[in-house]
Image (spheres, helix red, strand yellow):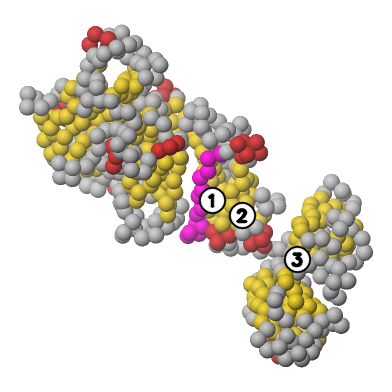
Amino acid sequence: MFKYYGLFPPYLPQMNNGIINEDDLSVDNKIYVEIAEYQRADVADEIRVNFDKISSKLKVITDPRHEFPVQMVFDANIIPDGVYKIDYSVTDFAGNTSESPFTFAIVDRRDSGTLPAPIFIDADINNIINNNDVISNFGTHIHVPIYPNMSIGDEVVLSFWIIDDETNLVAPGSSYTIKHLIVGQDITDGFVTLVPEINILLVKRGKAKARYQSIDASQHVETSKIATAILELDISVSLPAPVFIDNIHGWLTSTQLSKGIRTRCSYDDMAIGDIVTLYIRGYTMDNIPINGTSANIIHTVTLFDVDDGYLLLTFLKEIAEKLNFGYFTAYYKVFRANRTRYSYFSNVKVDLVHMNPLSAPVFMQAENGVIYISDIEMDDGAIVRVSYPEMALNDTLSIYIHGTDENGHFINNSGYQNVVILNTGDVANQYYDFIDPKEKALLVPKNGKLHAYFTVIYADDGGFSYSEQSDVVVDSKISDVITNNAAPYDYNVVHVRPYNYARVIDEPGTILKLSSPIYTQFVESGTNTHQVTINLEGEGRFRLLSSHSGDARISIVQAANPIISRSLMTHFGNYILTDGNIDFYNNSTNALSDGVMPCCIYLRTAPKDNISNVNITKVFVQVDGNAKIVGSTAIGGQSATINLNDDFSCEIQVVNTVSESISAIITLPESPGTLLILNLLFQ
């Protein structure tokens, strides 16, 4: 579903003088980016702000009435002096994503301001630029004069912005930055550039500001004084920005350009006979205009357009091929009855250099395209592995995951995204594992699907790639299962035998060969190897004990086809000491909710109550939920009295037929006040 939010460019409050300098950073050495409230802002919107390719921040909206403007804070310690693109995206509850236009942050801590100011050459003798001037010139011209030590090859970065007289703040959408390389003619004349009309026709009264930076071959930076002109305008920019309908996260690659540069224009009062002119212009990523990438389309609105409610206009793909790697700016104007109105502008980045699309991410727990609910529960989420050729330090990697039901409908609130910057460990591994949180992944019902894809912003040049989408079916079928946390076995210490109970599945009649670490033992074989024949129900069962605590991996190999193998991981815990009349205890957990596999509690009490000196001979246990105690004679089976062994120990087995977490409450009838509460999980 397409949904457009009409996003303003981000706002940088420290840019009121056109540059972020040392004074702006003096309080806390932070750079602040503000996001204005946008149309249809809602609870659970995810706002991701990108500070060029240096850093990204994510914010989830919880109260749209009071949280705007949203402010993101970036550490200036990791941001050297330079010019940076700032933009953001909004992803709503249903997974729709919109991308904002971008603005520029110019960081120049020294900010000398010594070079001669640029000149607004369209201003009249009173230094006023009026509405007619802007319309007739398609913007306003700024002259950058000759400055001391100007040399061929210097980079000049010109910045323009407007201070709105009503707010005394930078007018949203007015910031414009362009780079120019000094050529021979500039040495004698300087150069002139044009600020587009859509960056100007935003206020009725205001002050146009401009300044530039010169960067020579040795990367020495000098900054100019600020030029000011008075603006007396009509507010003509009022229409929604055009939309590059094929963009993916603000980018177009060769795949998205297969049908040309498709652009949609839509405004509320569209009428037959309106003359709509759509403009596009291409720039390098360093903001240098590219020859051959400026174009316009003129279209007269028809009845069919009015019925549709939008225009779909397409520029030739060849324009993007000339750009190759950079960005487009687009806007349109509407002429009707001797009046011209303008849209806000939109940007889209273009990358025809990097590989697209990349291979899909992998759901690591999935088998043959199926992921089991039990695995998601056990691992606290769905594990999605991302890998692509030549993963590099500081690449920015983003994952996008969502769920659909068995009819293919999006599941509200199942959307998950995360962004990381790769470190040296990730690069060494050449993969990164994301975890879709359990509370998101488990919103998908049986026979629904989880979907995932990722994007990359490359650290070396800021380029872009996106992946194919990976899809897996969610199933409630439980695969191999083993309980966890049983204590090590030592009959000399306590007269109970703690087991971790297991169930493996396969085709009926299959013989599975099992092996485990030397310090463990299969109860059925008495050694650390065992053989299980799968029964007619497709399952086999065994128990494992250990003389050590810690993890234990069980290798499972088909006897008839050893190349087919898998493993099952379990964990042995420890006894926990207490200072009461229960000396120590342990419990296993994570049993199947099949009414057969138990969670077990193992404990030993003191011989006598430490106050009354009465002999302790039994324990009383109660469970809640749908659990039952094995051997209980009570109605419902949820309570039982268990007699102690000769060493004052006992084992309590609890089973369940419902997947849930339950509580087991243990007391000592002969020792009032003794209480132990344990949580047991059934899957």
Question: Which amino acid does the dot numbered 2 rest on?
Answer: Ala
> Most prominent secondary structure in the magenta stretch?
loop
Q: Nearer the viewer, residue 276 or 126?
A: 126
Q: Is residue 420 above or below residue 226?
A: below
What residue sits 72% from the left and 72% below the top?
577
Q: Nearer the viewer, residue 587 or 548?
A: 548
Q: Are marks 2 and 3 in contact (CB under 8 Å)?
A: no
Question: Which amino acid does the dot numbered 1 rest on?
Answer: Ile
Q: Compute the Cα span from label 1 to label 2.
A: 10 Å
* Residue under numbered circle 3: 574
Q: Nearer the viewer, residue 445 or 145?
A: 145
Label placed on residue 382: 2
Q: Is residue 545 left or right of residue 169?
A: right
Q: Is residue 463 above or below residue 570?
A: above
Q: Are marks 1 and 2 in contact (CB under 8 Å)?
A: yes
Percent coordinates x, y for residue 364 in the rendering:
66, 49
What residue sits 63% from the left and 39% below the top?
425
Q: Is residue 187 above or below residue 450?
A: above
**558 drawn magenta:** no
Mark 3 Cα shell of 10 Å, populated few (<14), some (14-19), many (≥20) = some
Q: Secondary structure at mark 2?
A: strand
- Magenta-drawn segment: 408-422
Mark 2 Cα shell of 10 Å, populated few (<14), some (14-19), many (≥20) = many
What residue sits 21% from the left and 36% below the top?
162
Q: Earlier in the sequence, mark 3 or mark 1?
A: 1
- Front of the two marks 2 and 3: 3
Percent coordinates x, y for residue 52 in the rendering:
42, 35
